Image: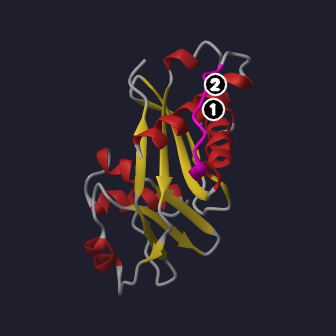
Amino acid sequence: MADLGDTLLTLARNAIAARLGQSTQPTGDQPALQDPAATFVTLTQGGQLRGCIGSLEAWRPLGQDVRENALAAAFRDPRFSPLSAAELPLTRVEVSLLTPAVALSFTDEADALAQLHPGRDGIILSCGSRRATFLPQVWEQLPSPTLFMAHLKQKAGLPADYWSPDIRLERYTVAKWKEAPP
């Protein structure tokens, strides 16, 4: 699995480097790259988020999903300007491979919060046309289920204290790999 992680990190960095006209590194060829998978690519600089885009459902081959999400995180995350060539050496790449999401069954918000596993669960919140997710890594900044859920609701465009019987929650986990600091 570590070999797969190294390959995914190299694929992500290579996609960004190639778009910036920089040299790329050889990657291993692994059969898993052809299997459908859902991934997120997260970029950081000095420990601060610089871009994060991903897929919640497996709908294209793993290798393609990583490359496309790397490009989207670097150049199309609406929270940031496109990554520049000068920034790439300062940028750390992380790839998260998601398990299929499983719906949570709950009676109210307290019941939903009690079922969360901080540090392990990624959560997808849906309500009407609104949808947002937090990867399990977000628990590092938002360690309490109440705080985690409040921020997730805000990310979905809802008030932090909003609750409705129409809210749907799904849980997933990730295998993740992160480059060493530049």
Residue at 39% x, 67% y: name it: 161
Check disc 1 and report its element: helix, strand or loop.
helix
Residue hosting label 2: 83
Quadrant holding the C terminus: top left
Question: What secondary structure is found at the residue carrying circle 2?
Answer: loop
Task: Look at 61% across and 51% down and name the residue there.
Answer: 62
80 vs 140: above or below? above
Q: Amino acid at mark 2?
A: Leu
Q: Is residue 68 left or right of residue 42?
A: right
Which amino acid type corresponds to the residue marked 1 in the rendered image? Ala
Badge 1 or badge 2: first in the primary sequence? 1
In the rendered image, the vertical position of residue 167 relative to residue 140, given as above or below: below
Residue 73 spot, x, y in % from top left: 61, 38
**Segment tinted magenta in the rendering:** 24-32
Q: Looking at the image, which residue is at 50% across and 58% down? A: 133
Decide whether the magenta segment is chiefly helix, strand or loop: loop
Question: Which percent across, then down, holds residue 158?
Answer: 51, 64
Q: Nearer the viewer, residue 7 or 81?
A: 7
Q: Residue 157: which quarter of the image?
A: bottom right
List the residue tagged with mark 1. Answer: 74
Residue 58, how many percent across, how many down?
61, 62
